Image (cartoon, grey):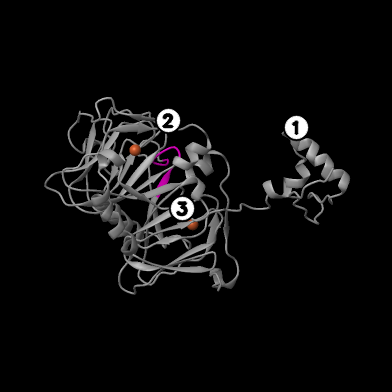
Amino acid sequence: MATKARENHREDVAGRANVEDTPELLAYYDELERLEAGALWTVANKIEPWAPKSSSVPVLWRYEDLRAHVLRSVELVSPEKAGRRVIYLNNPGRRDHAAAVGWLYSGLQVMHPGEVASAHAHSASALRFIMEGEGAYTIVDGHKMTLGANDFVLTPNGTWHEHGVSSDGTPCIWQDGLDIPLVNMLEANFYVVHPDLQQSVGYPVNDMTHTWGNPGLRPAGAEWSKGYSPLLKYEWAPTYEALQRYGKATDGSPYDGILMNYVNPVTGGPVMQTIGASMQMLRPGESTRAHRHTGSFIYQVAKGSGHSIIDGKRFDWKERDIFCVPSWAWHEHVNASASEDACLFTFNDLPVMHALGLYREEAFGDNGGRQPLVA
Ligand SMILES: [Fe+2]
Ligand SMILES: [Fe+2]
């Protein structure tokens, strides 16, 4: 019987699979396939790479290219019909998973004044980073938070949440970030629409920020044991001030400049169990050294302009642009301005990498720590 061509990932390296195809083996593989089985040595070198091989590619999404399309969705679909009116970022290597990079999803959502999205809950953890507009708010488990540009807000796994823009506001655009692809890959995703479609506000507006958002101070007697930060909103002004203050006390990281993680104030750990986030400041003229690490990263330029080199390719960015760094990709950042700082917001799956013991990091040793550009 004729045998069909099949994959065989051979490597001529001691300790790696290297079995040549023979008519007898090919017939044997066919018999195994009929039993829903296979010979590991034909695929071992593929499924056990020497180092992580991301199928994601580095991408820069220019806000000036996307913004008009995001606004146009307001004319094309209602939030009632669409559920959420979002243009999502679709990495060419991750289209099967609707992922922006790795196992992370991201999109740009728009709402007009007076619009309210229906309340819902899901197993995926979510965040929002506000890009423009006034009057946006989010309600999480009865806690209402008002939002302005560069504010960062959490809608963690399992919480009831809804978004809206007050009727005296302006059209608002924000970036959503979720671990939907990860939770789907783990086959653990549930989604529930709130039985009343909206939830009532049960606390004073911004109460969680007022309670938990005071530097170095924790309210006496306050308890919190959930797996995510009780400080559901991280405002831009104190975040930027913190970067400037920290910058007076440190030379910063050679790879990231002045970088501070958003944390759960109770544990000091990441804001949510699966997603971490940080804000970094590149000082005027700063040019970082390249490194790489496991974990997938999505950046949004919160302030300033410059460029990043990712796996040897240069990506020029300015305020509101979004770009991704796939796992184990070399990356370095440059602030283009000699007088102004530049700030990059990032969210990532580092909590997953750390929790599973999978975090690894490596400096780019050659060329003074700077990558040569590839054509
Ligand atoms: Fe949601
Ligand atoms: Fe990095």
22 or 53, which lies in front? 22
Quarter of the render that holds ligand 1 = top left
User: Do tag 2 and tag 1 residues touch (Cβ < 8 Å)?
Assistant: no
Q: Residue at x 87, y 47 (%)?
A: 23
358 or 109, which lies in front? 109
Task: Say if 212 sits above or below 3 in the image.
Answer: above
Q: Quadrant of residue 137?
A: top left
User: Do tag 2 and tag 3 residues touch (Cβ < 8 Å)?
Assistant: no
Q: Is residue 8 left or right of residue 160?
A: right
Amino acid type of disc 3?
A: Phe
Q: Is residue 366 left or right of residue 120?
A: right
Q: Residue at x 42, y 40 (%)?
A: 269
Task: Give the foreground label among 2 and 3.
Answer: 2
Bounds of the magenta span? 269-277
How far from the left and from the top, in percent, is residue 281?
36, 61
How far from the left and from the top, in percent, is residue 180?
44, 40
Q: Quadrant of residue 165?
A: top left
The N terminus, quarter of image: top right
Give the alpha-carbon distance from disc 1 to disc 3, as whole Å.
40 Å
How far from the left and from the top, in percent, is residue 315?
44, 67
Q: Main secondary structure of the magenta part?
A: loop
Picture disc at residue 35: 1
Amino acid type of disc 1?
A: Leu
Give the alpha-carbon distance from disc 2 to disc 3, as whole Å.
24 Å
Task: Give the foreground label among 2 and 1.
Answer: 1
Q: Which residue is mark 3?
A: 297
User: Residue at the top extreme?
Assistant: 195
Task: Say if 289 sits above or below 25 in the image.
Answer: below
Q: Which residue is mark 2?
A: 190
Tell me: is circle 1 under 8 Å from ligand 1: no
Task: Say if 109 sits above or below 374 in the image.
Answer: above
Q: Is residue 126 left or right of residue 103?
A: left
